Amino acid sequence: MLVFFNTHISNIITQQFKICCLRADLTTFCPAKPLWPNSCGRLIDSNLLKSLIWFISTVGILMNITSCILAYCKLLPSGDTYNTIVICLSISDAVCCISLLIIILADAIFGKDYINYELYWRRSFFCHCSSVLSVISTLLSIFTINLLTVTRYCIVKSPLDSIFLDTEFLTKICTCASLLVIVLAISLILTYLFTADYYKLPTGLCTLLGLNEKYIISKTFTIITVISLCLSSLTIPAMYSFLLHEMYQSKAIVEATMTSHNSYDGVSKSILVVFTNLLSWIPSVILLCMTFVWNEYPYVLLIWTLSVVMPSNTLINPFAFVFYKLIRRLISNHFLRNNPAGSKS
């Protein structure tokens, strides 16, 4: 915009902070101050952050769709029950990537003029959709990771008669949980919008996580998320410790799970998936806990956590489910071709 081109302004009196944003050198002396965490910058300021979001969102969507299709077609050699959970988690991760893609597309569209469209964006249908998708992904991924852990433990504990060997039963659990999460997410966002001014979300990231006490609905969702992540971070490692203890304690169980249900391979991949998720949850919990102590903390921490740290598992999960197995198979075939004598023996 060239409104102030070749003009000299020494004083400005306004209650609209974005008017000061028209001249970057005036923002320091502007009498109107923005409400945290708003500023004159772009929606996503850092070029590195933008590149990472583009990469995670686009590659994550492709990888998770591939993982979901292979699991649906039963091309993953880990059993039908395992495929059901893979589909649920892949859908959750794909939803997260779509939410990120909406945000980064908004940044590309508005560019440096974002401050002029900030209110329009926060009230827009696409920002509301991104918020709903973000809530769905957060809650559904926590549920699926816990379900994955419980399923692996029960199958290893009772490899022949566990109820989780019933694919139809597991499908019903995933379906009901997904529908419940969708209803909760829509209800949460609608409740916030009807209690907010002008039906706008609190930030341009279209998230309800990590905001100050002014936003009661946001605070409630943050508390629910923190409690869920903390409980999962404690119970999941404990359950996998019991699982590994059972596997080493009884060789018969291990042999049965390897030959009958492919659970041993499933356990190894589950451990990789679960603990990489835990690694991304820990900094998220720390940051979200900060919101209960400081009302205004560096906004860049929230952006990096919600846009990179937490969504990083959308790439790790499909890699562990699909591409890790394919790479192992390629290496194995290469070894067999180069060592025919060893394979015969």
Image (cartoon, rainbow, N blue to C red):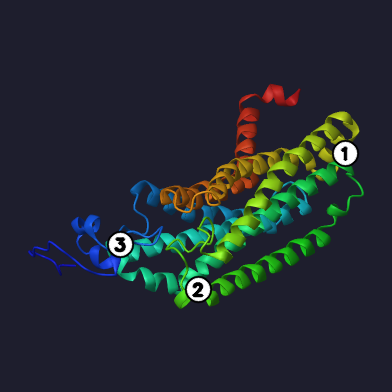
Judged by depth in the image, the label closer to the viewer, 1 or 2, is 2
Task: Choose between 205 and 195: the one closer to the eye.
Answer: 195
Q: Quick check: marks 1 and 2 in contact, CB under 8 Å?
A: no
Is residue 139 shown to the viewer in this render?
yes
Residue 145 percent location from the top left of the image: 69, 50
Query: Mark 2 belongs to which amino acid?
Result: Ala
Q: Mark 3 and mark 1: span between their CA atoms?
A: 58 Å
Residue at left 70%, top 55%? 143
Which residue matches tag 2?
Answer: 196
Label 1 belongs to which residue?
Answer: 256
Q: Which residue is mark 3?
A: 111
Using a 10 Å C-alpha cutoff, classify the residue at mark 1 as few (fewer than 14 neighbours), some (14 to 19) or many (20 or more).
Answer: some
Q: Which of the two labelled residues, at mark 1 and mark 2, occupies the earlier sequence position?
A: 2
Q: CA distance from mark 1 to mark 2?
A: 56 Å
**Callout 2: helix, strand or loop?**
loop
Left/right of residue 147 with respect to residue 33 in the rendered view? right
Q: Quadrant of the N terminus?
A: bottom left
User: Given this view, does label 3 or label 1 mark the residue nearer the observer?
Assistant: 3
Neighbour tally class for label 3: few under 14, some 14-19, many 20 plus, Cα within 10 Å: some
Q: Amino acid at mark 1?
A: Ala
